[in-house]
């Protein structure tokens, strides 16, 4: 355990050095504290934001939006991808549309979701759902297509019916690619969440960043920016652990 | 120890190809059939949009008719605004992409050849990649102002990560036999990198570039929406501020077309550049 700690320390030392350089650079006046408040000031501002509840209420709003949008995109996107891989007519009809909409920069949908559902939760959830669905669909589709024919045949020869086979054979073998697609969607959900909250929102962490920046409280703004960045990173790491656990039986 | 290879969110996505296995005489018929099916769903969507908009179920503000939106796009084109805005957006997206691409490849090479560079940059990249870097937009504006420099910087920062990661994975994946035989034939370290490792890593690097290109466009649009002014994102910002829903929908169609074109050009370049390589067509649509 001690060795692991030491290895982790050596590995992440560059980040510590960067943080130190930030503090020293701002303290010694090497860079203007207006442009870069010292890290310790930012930390104090963070505690202040936590105390007066700003961070909690806005953070909860943001996480609810990202979570709900992502949940919808995973359920509907995965179902769509597997159905497309399993029934050819569906594939023929839908794959041109998927191919057409996949490269579309999803941030273009921010104004229209606001136009439809206003500045609140609905527009953010819709945006994240629409933006994150296609990577999940493609992951499920590619995974289900590559499910080994031999497995399908042997399941069929053992008398498994179509639906049973879908659940027992196709879905598990689609899992690795599906989980990868969800990982892309997870990263995308944070990007869409922050962009849409920066551009059109009245609460949420992205809104808080824009608000604090506009009012010139840069130490607090840096505190929220770092919080959002850290949340994105932690979400990805937690997902990675869950994903490896889910895939352990395969190997 | 976890390395950068574990940190690439999502692998390259395979194309939505339909496997062809028709008997020879009917092949042309089936090809025509597929072609029709592809056009059919896009047309059906267009018709459904027009009908839904005209049925009165939605107000023209919520859903303007496709014909009205196309008319608006035509007007934008005739007045020259469309070309100007597309040009400005593409200029920002591509400049940022190029800076990010060159910096990413150079950094990736440095990281895979040099232990100190690896020690310093590995944690920064593996922590920075999954972060929503767009949150730093107000910080970048604070430092660099509201004009092109801040937008292009933001785009370059976002574009660099997929390229660095792909370069490292690519160079790491070069077969040892290839390196050994090159060294045996008297290649120096420099030649080894430029003439063996880099070309062999090219498919991965191009995949990284193909991931970065749409990201560059997304970030360009977001920064323009946030700051306003010229550009496709700026135009949508204006339209949405004045409750001009035709303008908003026209912007979506325009941006979708530009995004589609960029991705197609990307996969075309991949096929051209990698003619000699077995992975020429592997991950095409991203």
Image (spheres, helix red, strand yellow):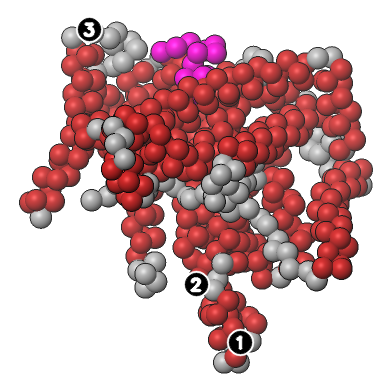
Q: Is residue B75 rendered to the left or right of residue B95?
A: right
Residue denoted by label 1: A156
> From this viewpoint, is residue A61 visible?
no
N-terminal-most mark, 2 or 1: 1
Q: Position of residue A216 (x, y in %)?
A: 40, 14
Report the side of B129 relative to B68 (left or right): left
Residue drawn at the location 73% of the way across and 34% of the way down: B257
Residue A227 lies within the magenta run: no
Report how far apart the C-alphas of labels 2 and 1 lie in the structure: 16 Å
Task: Say which residue label 2 marks.
Answer: A172
Q: CA distance from mark 2 to mark 3?
A: 58 Å
Residue bounds of the magenta highlight: B143-157
Callout 3: helix, strand or loop?
Answer: loop
**Tag in front: 1 or 3:** 1
Q: Quadrant of the N terminus of chain A?
A: bottom left
Horizontal side of B115 relative to A88 (left or right) equals: left
Name above or below for residue B85 compared with residue A102. above
The mark nearer the N terminus, 1 or 3, is 3
Residue B48: x and y in percent read 86, 50
Report the mark closest to the observer, 2 or 3: 2
- Please say whether residue B10 is visible from this viewpoint: yes
Q: Chain of mark 1?
A: A
Q: Main secondary structure of the magenta part?
A: helix
The residue sitting at the bottom extreme is: A158
Q: Which residue is mark 3?
A: A29
Judge by depth and name the residue closer to the eye, B211 or A121: B211
Labels 2 and 3 within one chain? yes
Q: In the depicted view, which residue is nearer to us: A13 or A242?
A: A13
- Position of residue B136 relative to residue A189, above or below, is above
């Amino acid at each position: 355990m001690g060795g692991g700690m030491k290895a982790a320390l050596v590995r992440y030392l560059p980040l510590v050095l960067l943080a130190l350089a930030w503090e020293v650079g701002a303290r010694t006046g090497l860079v203007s504290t207006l442009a870069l408040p010292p890290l310790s000031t930012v930390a104090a501002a963070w505690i202040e934001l936590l105390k007066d509840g700003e961070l909690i209420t806005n953070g909860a709003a943001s996480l609810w939006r990202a979570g709900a949008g992502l949940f919808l995109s995973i359920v509907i996107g995965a179902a769509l991808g597997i159905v497309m891989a399993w029934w050819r007519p569906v594939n023929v009809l839908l794959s041109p549309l998927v191919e057409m909409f996949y490269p579309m920069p999803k941030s273009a949908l921010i104004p229209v979701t606001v136009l439809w559902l206003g500045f609140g939760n609905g527009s953010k959830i819709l945006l994240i759902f629409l933006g994150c669905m296609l990577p999940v669909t493609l992951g499920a589709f590619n995974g289900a297509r590559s499910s080994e024919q031999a497995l399908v045949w042997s399941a069929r020869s053992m008398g498994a019916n179509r639906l049973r086979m879908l659940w027992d054979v196709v879905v598990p073998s689609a899992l690795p690619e599906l989980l990868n697609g969800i990982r892309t969607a997870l990263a995308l959900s944070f990007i869409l969440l922050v962009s849409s909250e920066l551009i059109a929102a009245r609460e949420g962490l992205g809104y808080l960043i824009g608000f604090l920046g506009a009012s010139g409280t840069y130490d607090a703004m840096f505190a929220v920016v770092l919080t959002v960045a850290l949340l994105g990173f932690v979400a990805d790491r937690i997902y990675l652990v869950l994903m490896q656990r889910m895939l352990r039986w395969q190997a | 120890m976890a390395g950068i290879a574990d940190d690439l969110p999502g692998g390259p996505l395979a194309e939505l190809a339909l496997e062809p296995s028709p008997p020879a005489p009917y092949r042309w018929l089936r090809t025509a059939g597929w072609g029709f099916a592809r056009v059919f769903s896009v047309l059906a969507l267009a018709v459904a949009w027009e009908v839904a908009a005209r049925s009165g179920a939605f107000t023209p503000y919520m859903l303007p008719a496709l014909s009205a939106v196309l008319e608006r796009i035509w007007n934008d084109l005739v007045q020259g605004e469309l070309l100007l805005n597309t040009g400005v957006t593409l200029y920002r997206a591509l400049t940022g992409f190029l800076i990010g691409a060159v910096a990413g490849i150079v950094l990736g090479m440095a990281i895979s050849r040099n232990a100190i560079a690896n020690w310093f940059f590995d944690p920064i990249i593996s922590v920075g990649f999954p972060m929503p870097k767009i949150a730093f937009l107000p910080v970048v504006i604070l430092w660099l102002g509201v004009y092109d420099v801040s937008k292009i910087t933001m785009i370059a920062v976002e574009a660099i990560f997929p390229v660095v990661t792909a370069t490292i994975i690519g160079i790491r994946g070069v077969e040892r036999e290839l390196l050994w035989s090159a060294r045996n034939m008297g290649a120096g370290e420099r030649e080894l990198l430029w003439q063996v490792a880099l070309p062999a890593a090219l498919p991965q690097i191009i995949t990284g570039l193909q991931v970065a290109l749409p990201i560059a466009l997304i970030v360009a649009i977001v920064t323009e929406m946030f700051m306003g002014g010229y550009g496709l994102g700026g135009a949508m910002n204006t339209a949405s501020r004045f409750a001009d829903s035709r303008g908003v929908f026209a912007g979506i169609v325009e941006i979708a077309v530009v995004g589609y074109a960029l991705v197609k050009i990307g996969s075309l370049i991949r096929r051209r550049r990698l003619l000699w390589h077995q992975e020429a067509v592997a991950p095409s649509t991203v």
